[in-house]
Image (cartoon, rainbow, N blue to C red):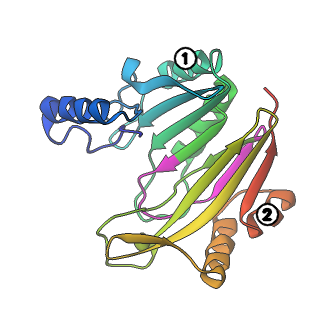
Amino acid sequence: FNLANNHFSDQGERGILETRENLDQLGFFYVGCRDKQVDDCSAKVIETADLRVGMAGFSMVYGLFDIGLATSSVAKLASSSDLVIVNIHWGVEYEHQSNRFQQNIPHELVDAGADIIVGHHPHVVQGIEVYKNRPIFYSLGNFMFDQYFSRDTQIGLGLGINFNKEELDIGLFPLSSLKSQPRLMGERDGEKELSNLIKWSSLDEVYVEQVKTGKIIINFVK
């Protein structure tokens, strides 16, 4: 889980501690500090099977986090991991287009060693970019949320990541939610949402054609 977001400290330090204790007891992996904070709680290496996955979580809703600390954290993960996934809570709510504050930061994180960047917070799906052969998903939208006032806030995007040290095969799964019950979209509705995703994205023709099929394939070279 990524815990870094603008509501993580809503119940104060006690709420933060209880959240971490509960996740530890349940055996879940998690990263992330409170909004704007970059610290030891921002990153972790997870060992699974024969793979070392570096996870980082940041949040920049009420202000920017320290990009120098963040790039150092990502670089440290990259030096000891096979794959580095960065989650960032950012962006303007209900806007399908990412903004310049979002667009400047992921490039620096990829340069530092991030392999996949996954964004959230706007409550709607935003576009994709591929920078130096690394995918940036600016916002996956809502997965489960009681914002029933619009169709867009009931649409989300799921990612299925297959990684074999030579290739990233990322499945794109459009989701719709009814009364906080998410489900995969049917073929026709899914194609429509993938077309919208292309419209909000900055992609070359190769990746545009891939998105139409519901996946992105990236040659992975460290």
Say which amino acid is labelled 2.
Answer: Val
Position in image of residue 142 (x %, y %): 42, 62
Residue 165 lies in quadrant:
top right
**Element at badge 1?**
helix
Which residue lies at the image location 55% right of the left edge and 55% below the top edge? 98
User: On residue 208, which mark appears?
Assistant: 2
For label 1, the crowd category at 10 Å Cα-Cα, with few meaning under 14, some 14 to 19 and many 20 or more, is some
Q: Main secondary structure of the magenta part?
A: loop
Residue 71 lies in quadrant:
top right
Position in image of residue 191 (x %, y %): 68, 77
Q: Which residues are magenta?
A: 119-133
| Residue at mark 1 | 72
Specify whether residue 124 is painted magenta: yes
Residue 60 lies in quadrant:
top left
Disc 2 + disc 1, Cβ < 8 Å: no
Q: Nearer the viewer, residue 185 or 154?
A: 185
